[in-house]
């Protein structure tokens, strides 16, 4: 009759021991750290590997040390030159001091996300649209420095901030397309004008050389005749220089 109570008590004891061991033994991975509180007081940061805790007295909060890639939701921003745009970004950060990430802020993930959103609106709102499109690397560095400075007391290191996409209004996109087209047309006209100018300079140089050297003019004349002869023409007109005819004209004048 006494075996049944003994068996029930044994089961209760075994279950209690299992509960105690399960609450006292923790295993942390290589990228995890455990912030241990004893009766509400911060004791230490432990890990990785096997961690032994005092049941009921010790409480542990796990913190990941891996880099977190956080998307910043699209933000409606009015630039300094009064252009309404929508911008989203991505923030790369990791926890360097687990005890600060747990003690100094209630939820470091939410806090970093909210501060990134406000910083994105503030910094981009002080810039012009042309700067946002042409100096994105500079703006990324400025965002990284500001966010990293404010999250440092939380034990968080912001390694990089990237502006992913800038959505422009349709009318602004059309205006920028027209501007780009006008710029390309202007460049093409400038290049054509420079080509005409260089060609005119070469022609002027050639005319000067031919005027100074009559033999060069004769050689050019013979070369032109050869080029004409290579064509499949039924009729060929040979231009005769006036210098070849001038001696005969002088002979007629000398005769009485």
Image (spheres, rainbow, N blue to C red):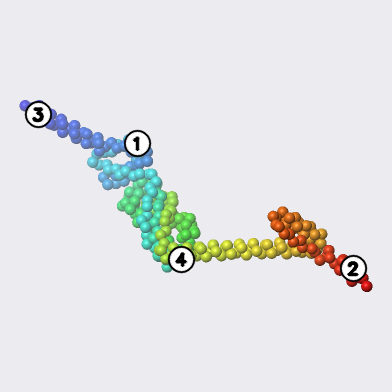
In primary-sequence order, the first of circles 4 and 3 is 3
In primary-sequence order, the first of circles 4 and 2 is 4
Q: CA distance from mark 2 to mark 3?
A: 156 Å
Q: Which residue is mark 4?
A: 175
Q: Say which residue appears at 32% left-offset and 35% top-offset.
A: 50
In primary-sequence order, the first of circles 3 and 1 is 3
Q: Is residue 45 left or right of residue 228?
A: left
Q: Is residue 58 left or right of residue 228?
A: left
Q: Residue 91, how many percent across, how many down?
A: 40, 52
Q: CA distance from mark 3 to mark 1?
A: 41 Å
Q: Say which residue appears at 48% left-offset and 65% top-offset.
A: 178
Residue 181 or residue 113, whichever sits in front:
181
Q: Which residue is mark 2?
A: 251
| Label 2 Cα neighbours within 10 Å, binned few <14 / some 14-19 / many ≥20 | few
Q: Which residue is mark 3?
A: 4
Residue 121 or residue 166, whichever sits in front:
166
Q: Say which residue appears at 93% left-offset and 73% top-offset.
A: 256
Q: Which residue is mark 1?
A: 49
């Amino acid at each position: 009759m006494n075996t049944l109570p003994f068996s029930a008590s044994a089961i209760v004891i075994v279950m209690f021991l299992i509960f105690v061991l399960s609450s006292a033994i923790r295993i942390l991975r290589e990228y995890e750290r455990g912030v241990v509180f004893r009766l509400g007081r911060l004791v230490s940061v432990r890990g990785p590997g096997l961690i032994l805790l005092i049941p009921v007295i010790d409480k542990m909060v796990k913190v990941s040390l891996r880099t977190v890639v956080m998307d910043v939701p699209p933000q409606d921003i009015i630039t300094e030159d009064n252009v309404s745009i929508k911008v989203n970004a991505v923030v790369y950060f990791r926890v360097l001091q687990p005890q600060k990430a747990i003690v100094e802020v209630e939820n470091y993930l939410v806090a970093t996300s909210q501060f990134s959103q406000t910083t994105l609106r503030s910094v981009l709102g002080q810039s012009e649209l042309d700067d946002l499109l042409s100096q994105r690397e500079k703006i990324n560095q400025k965002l990284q420095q500001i966010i990293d400075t404010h999250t440092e007391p939380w034990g968080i290191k912001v390694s990089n901030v990237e502006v992913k996409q800038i959505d422009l209004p349709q009318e602004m996109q059309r205006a920028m397309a027209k501007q780009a087209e006008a710029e390309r047309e202007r460049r093409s006209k400038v290049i054509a004008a420079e080509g005409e100018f260089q060609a005119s300079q070469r022609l002027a140089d050639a005319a000067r050389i031919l005027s100074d050297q009559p033999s060069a003019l004769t050689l050019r004349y013979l070369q032109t005749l050869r080029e004409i002869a290579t064509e499949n023409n039924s009729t060929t007109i040979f231009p005769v220089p006036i210098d070849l005819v001038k001696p005969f004209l002088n002979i007629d004048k000398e005769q009485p």
